[in-house]
Amino acid sequence: MKKTALITGITGQDGSYLAELLLAQGYRVVGMTRRTSTDVHERIQHIVDDIEFVSGDLLDQTSMTSIVADVMPDEIYNLAAQSFVPTSWQQPVLTGEFTALGVTRVLEAVRATNPKIRFYQASSSEMFGKVTEVPQRESTPFYPRSPYGVAKVYGHWITVNYRESYDMFAVSGILFNHESPRRGKEFVTRKISDGVARIKLGLANRLALGNLDAQRDWGFAGDYVRAMWLMLQQDVPDDYVVATGRTHRVRDFVRIAFEAAGLGSFEKYVVQDPRFMRPAEVDLLIGDPTKAHEQLGWKPDVSFEQLVEMMVRADIDRLSARAGA
């Protein structure tokens, strides 16, 4: 029989790639969206006719329980969250409601409806924060440095708690930074690729950024959703770090992006703006994906350099098409 998957946050970057993957695997895909007066389906427009949609809200326990009872999914992927770290400083309580307590509401809906449903929680490398060891692995202690990171730690541990307390197949994927041309423009990687494209096309002459020396382990979102799916296909539920095992500075991303656009050195275009500095910075995040390699058979296909070039090309093509329209 065809499996059914319920995805919260289906209109986001990860949700769109995951929906594509599950449809290709023959799943019935149901996406939960919040009721809104604007069209938020841009990232999934090409597959929107193949997806069923239900309206729900992570802030509302009744709606979550009703959706799970109505859809009766085999698998739930909880990707919905307030996921932009700087915003979590401006809206810390709302971030906690969505990103922390929202996880509990979904788990409660599963427990009350059908504890046999397999549940995936989108955890984050931001939980490691002020890192206590390099690289970070599943056993590395958490030391979050933002309201977002703190909320994700709660979401992670409540998933473990429900797994151990109720014998549920509930897992967390501790995903390091994963990007794509579908990334929101508020994220630094997409801000860079979009900014470089605008400079290339003569639509801008400078790019303002924050800390160029912050280091991250960046991969391609399309690779990372495959790891999510693999986690729910295992015999035993467990948590996994998903990462490339390589780290790069923001300035490395900038350098490759400008070179990919044929603009040469970035120094004459990039300015550092104090407005984009975090109150508490996470300086070095690099994951150890050994467990995912060995137990899931997962490895990323797209390199860091290929990812940057992909994003720059996509933004140049997008802006060129818009200018020619």
Image (cartoon, grey):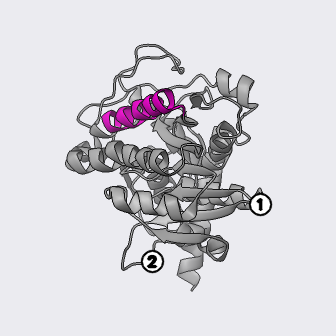
Question: Quarter of the image containing the C terminus?
Answer: bottom right
Where is residue 286 shown, x and y percent of the image? 52, 25
Q: CA distance from mark 2 to mark 1?
A: 26 Å
Q: Which residue is mark 2?
A: 39
Q: Amino acid at mark 2?
A: Asp
Where is residue 8 shown, x and y percent of the image? 49, 57
Looking at the picture, does residue 287 appear above or below residue 270? above
Q: Is residue 160 visible?
A: yes
Q: Amino acid at mark 1?
A: Gly
Q: Which residue is mark 1?
A: 26
Q: Earlier in the sequence, mark 2 or mark 1?
A: 1
Task: Name the residue: 49% across, 33% down.
Answer: 166
Where is residue 229 shown, x and y percent of the image? 67, 44
Region of the chain picked out in magenta, as a range = 149-167
Question: Quarter of the image containing the N terminus?
Answer: bottom right
Q: Nearer the viewer, mark 2 or mark 1?
A: 1
